[in-house]
Image (cartoon, helix red, strand yellow):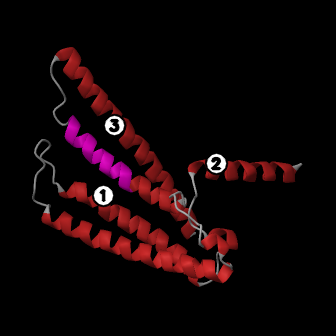
Amino acid sequence: MIKRALDGYCRAVEWLLVALLGLMVVLVFGNVLMRYAFNSGITVSEELSRWFFVWLTFLGGAVAVRERAHLGSDMLTSRLGPMGKRLCLGLGQALMLWATWLLLSGSWQQVLINWDVEAPVTGASVAVFYLAGVVFAISTGAMLLGEFWRTLTGQLTEAELVMVQESEDLAQIEELHLDQSHTFKKH
C-alpha cells in the first residue's frame, strides 16, 4: 500500500516536472522572442523560470531517489558479502537521512526568515523559493525511511543492497538485458 502511494506520488511529481519544464520553455522562449521581435519582454520571465528550475531540480532529485537513479560507485560494496552490503547500505541510508534532516531544518528556517520578503519582480514571497527544499526533504525522507526500515528488517534482496547506478549507459544496458530475459522466459 505504501509502495503504491509513493509510486503514485512520484507519477504526479513527474507530471508536475513536465509542466514546470514546459512553463520554463514558454517563458524563456517567449521572452527571447519578445525582446528580438518586439523590443519588449516578459517582466516576470527570468524570476519565474529561475524558481521553476529550482523546483524542477529538487522534485527531480526526489523522484531519482525513489527510482534509485542517482549515480555512484559500488567499487567497494560489490566485493562484499550480503552482510557487508547490508551494513554499508544501512550506514549510507543513515547518513542520507541525516543530510536530509539538515536540508529540511535549514530550508524550513529559510522559509520562516523569508516569509515576509517579497521577490523583486513578482512580489511573491521568497519563502516559496526555499519551500522546494522542504518538499524535497520531506519526500526524500519518507522514501529513505521506508528503505532504511526494509534494510534493517532484512526485506531487501541481495540485488537491492546496492543503491547506485554506475553510469546511465550501464543502467540502460542492464535494463535491456532484463527486458530480453523476460521476453525469453515468456516464449
Label 3 and label 1: CA atoms lie apart by 17 Å
Is the residue 2 above or below the residue 130 in the image? below
User: In terms of secondary structure, what is the magenta stretch mainly?
Assistant: helix
Horizontally, residue 59 falls left or right of residue 157, namely: left
Disc 2 crowd, CA 10 A, few/some/many (<14, 14-19, 20+): few
| Residue 137: image location, x then y, percent | 36, 67
| Residue 76: image location, x then y, percent | 59, 72
Q: Badge 2 is on which residue?
A: 172
Q: In percent of the image, x 41 and y 47: which residue is there?
A: 16
Horizontally, residue 73 falls left or right of residue 29, namely: right
Q: Which quadrant would the N terminus be assigned to in this image? A: bottom right
Name the residue nearer the viewer: 179 or 111.
Answer: 179
* Image disc number at residue 132: 1
Q: Residue type at mark 1?
A: Ala
Q: Quadrant of residue 62?
A: bottom left
Q: Residue type at mark 3?
A: Leu
Q: Badge 3 is on which residue?
A: 23
Furthest-right residue in this view:
187
